[in-house]
Image (cartoon, helix red, strand yellow):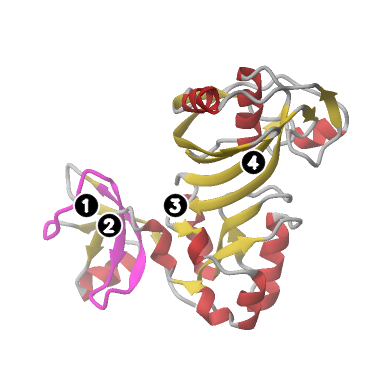
Amino acid sequence: MTSGLINVLKPPGMTSHDVVSFIRRTYHLKRVGHAGTLDPAASGVLPVALGSATRLLEYMTDTDKSYRVELTIGYETDTGDDTGAILNNAVCVMPVKTEIEKVLSSFIGTIEQIPPMYSAIKIQGKKLYELARAGITVERQPRIITIHNITLLHIDDTRILFDVTCSKGTYIRSLCSDIGKKINCPVVMSFLVRTRVGDFSLENSFTLQEIENNSPVALLPLDYAIGYMPKVILTPEIAQAFQYGQSIENSTHTVSKQTVLRIYDQEHSFIGIGQINTDTAVITPIKVIKLE
């Protein structure tokens, strides 16, 4: 069975699930999943896992993400982007560049953000967007996120273009709305492209057509997205014990204080993820990868 990761350039107009369905058909696989949903109207980097790599998706969700965003002033919608129904119009004057830069920089750091109603967060078993489509608005609790960097690229009479790098769980539509509140003007997110998810960058992504025309070229190794974990190489005998699910001693290897490790055999083949007890130096297998 084919296993690995693909850095997909999702086009606008497709859901993330649509992309997964396309990959399933192209590679003739059932076990396919994605990391980090993109709105249908948005485009950009969508990491997709195939085969055994789907077992590693949980370790890819905490990575930082980068976006290029266009914000349009003068109106707001129920969805927060330009695909929704217009709720409010206003005549606005675009603030000067220095004021926009000051507003953008005020969001840098760890902040609270209220998720939009049109999101997949569940409240009492119902997804928020399902409630929103039924005309129901509920109170959402703020979430802690981090904006690492935000850079103004361009402004004109109605639009602001900026780049932002942020933590997992950040909603760019909510960020745009919050920017609008600070400049005292209704706004919508009118364009969004995700330029990076962890080690997956826009420059190295593949369009659906490129994947369809040459599917083997797009496939990345299983361990591509977990390079942040310390690496441990085991002798053949100990590697075999690890693959059988046995805890192993790590006395011959020095690792950092991180407790989750990438495990390899002496042929440098990736065989799984282990968790080390830093007091006893014992590694317990938590994911054993057996290529099919």
Q: Please state the horizontal and vertical placement of residue 275, each as a whole percent of the image.
A: 31, 50
In the image, what residue occupies the spot 61% across and 65% down?
Answer: 32
Of the image marks 3 and 4, the number of the one nearer the N terminus: 4
Of the image marks 4 and 1, the number of the one nearer the N terminus: 4
Of the residues tagged 3 and 4, which is closer to the observer? 4
Mark 2 → mark 4, Cα distance in angstroms: 51 Å
Of the image marks 3 and 1, the number of the one nearer the N terminus: 3
> Is residue 48 or residue 126 the one in the foreground?
48
Q: Secondary structure at mark 1?
A: strand
Q: Amino acid at mark 2?
A: Ser
- Which region is colored magenta? 251-276
Of the image marks 2 and 1, the number of the one nearer the N terminus: 2
Density class for disc 4 (Cα within 10 Å; few <14, some 14-19, many ≥20) is many
| 256 inside magenta stretch | yes
State the residue position of label 4: 70
Q: Please state the horizontal and vertical placement of residue 216, each as a whole percent of the image.
A: 53, 81
Q: Residue furthest left?
A: 252
> Is residue 199 or residue 290 the one in the foreground?
199
| In the depicted structure, whether residue 142 falls above or below residue 147 | above
Of the residues tagged 3 and 2, which is closer to the observer? 3
Marks 2 and 1 in Cβ contact (< 8 Å): yes
Marks 2 and 4 in Cβ contact (< 8 Å): no
State the residue position of label 3: 198
State the residue position of label 2: 247
Of the image marks 3 and 2, the number of the one nearer the N terminus: 3
Q: Secondary structure at mark 2?
A: loop
Is 119 left or right of 255, judged from the image as shown?
Answer: right
Mark 3 → mark 1, Cα distance in angstroms: 29 Å
Of the image marks 2 and 4, the number of the one nearer the N terminus: 4
